[in-house]
Image: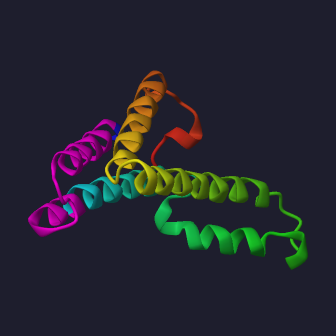
C-alpha cells in the first residue's frame, strides 16, 4: 500500500513540475484526485491496523486534544503525552519543511520529498511484512 501511495505522490509531483500553472484548470483537479486517493489509502491502512495513538493528519486535532487531556495539568497519570506530542511535532516539522520548499524553491518539490520518503518507508517496511507482533496484525 505504501508503494501505491508513493506512486500517486510521485505522479502528482511530475504533473506539478511539468505544468506551467499546476494551480489552474483541469490539472489542479487531477492533483486533488491523486493526492486525495493517496491520503485516503493511508488513512484506511492506519484505521485497519488499529495501532493505538498512531496519528494521521486527519486526526491531528484529536491527538492535540488527547495530549492536553492526558497531561498532568488535566489530572492524568498516564504517560501518553510524550508520544502524542512527538507525533504532533513530527507533523509540524514536516509541514514547515514542505512549506519552506514550496515557497522558496518550487511548489512541486514537497511532493517529490514526500514521494521519496514514502519509497524509503516502503523499503524499510519490506523486511517486516512477515512480523507476528500484535501491532502488525489487522484489528
Frontmost residue, 105 versus 50? 105
Q: Is residue 74 above or below residue 105?
A: below
What is the residue that sits farthest to the top in this orientation?
127
Give the colouring mode of the picture. Answer: rainbow
Q: Locate residue 101 relative to residue 63 in the image: left or right.
A: left
Picture quarter with the N terminus: top left
Q: Residue at x 35, y 47 (%)?
A: 111
Question: How many numbered discs, if any?
Answer: 0
Pick out the residue farthest to the bottom. 74
Task: Give the percent coordinates (x, y) of residue 102.
Answer: 41, 54
Residue at position x 32%, y 40% from top? 6
Residue 26 rendering spot, x and y as whole percentages? 9, 66
Reply above or below: 28 against 20.
below
Q: Position of residue 72 (x, y in %)?
A: 90, 70
| Residue lying farthest to the left in this orientation | 26
Majority SS type along the magenta span: helix
**In the shown orientation, is residue 79 left or right of residue 117?**
right
**Can you give x and y, in whole percent of width and height, for residue 80 in the image?**
76, 58
Locate residue 72 relative to residue 70 in the image: left or right: right
Residues shaded magenta: 3-32
Q: Quadrant of residue 126?
A: top left
**Residue at point 22% right, 65% down?**
23
Q: Which residue is at 76% across, 73% downward? A: 68
Amino acid at each position: 500500500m505504501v508503494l501505491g501511495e508513493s506512486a500517486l505522490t510521485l505522479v502528482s509531483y511530475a504533473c506539478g513540475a511539468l505544468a506551467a500553472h499546476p494551480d489552474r484548470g483541469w490539472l489542479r483537479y487531477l492533483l486533488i484526485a491523486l493526492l486525495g486517493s493517496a491520503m485516503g489509502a493511508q488513512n484506511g491502512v492506519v484505521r485497519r491496523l488499529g495501532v493505538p495513538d498512531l496519528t494521521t493528519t486527519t486526526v491531528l486535532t484529536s491527538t492535540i486534544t488527547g495530549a492536553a487531556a492526558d497531561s498532568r495539568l488535566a489530572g492524568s497519570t498516564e504517560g501518553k503525552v510524550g508520544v502524542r506530542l512527538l507525533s504532533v511535532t513530527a507533523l509540524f516539522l514536516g509541514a514547515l519543511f514542505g512549506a519552506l520548499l514550496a515557497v522558496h524553491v518550487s511548489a512541486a518539490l514537497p511532493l517529490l520529498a514526500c514521494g521519496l520518503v514514502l519509497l524509503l518507508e516502503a523499503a524499510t517496511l519490506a523486511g517486516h511484512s512477515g512480523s507476528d507482533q500484535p501491532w502488525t496484525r489487522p484489528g
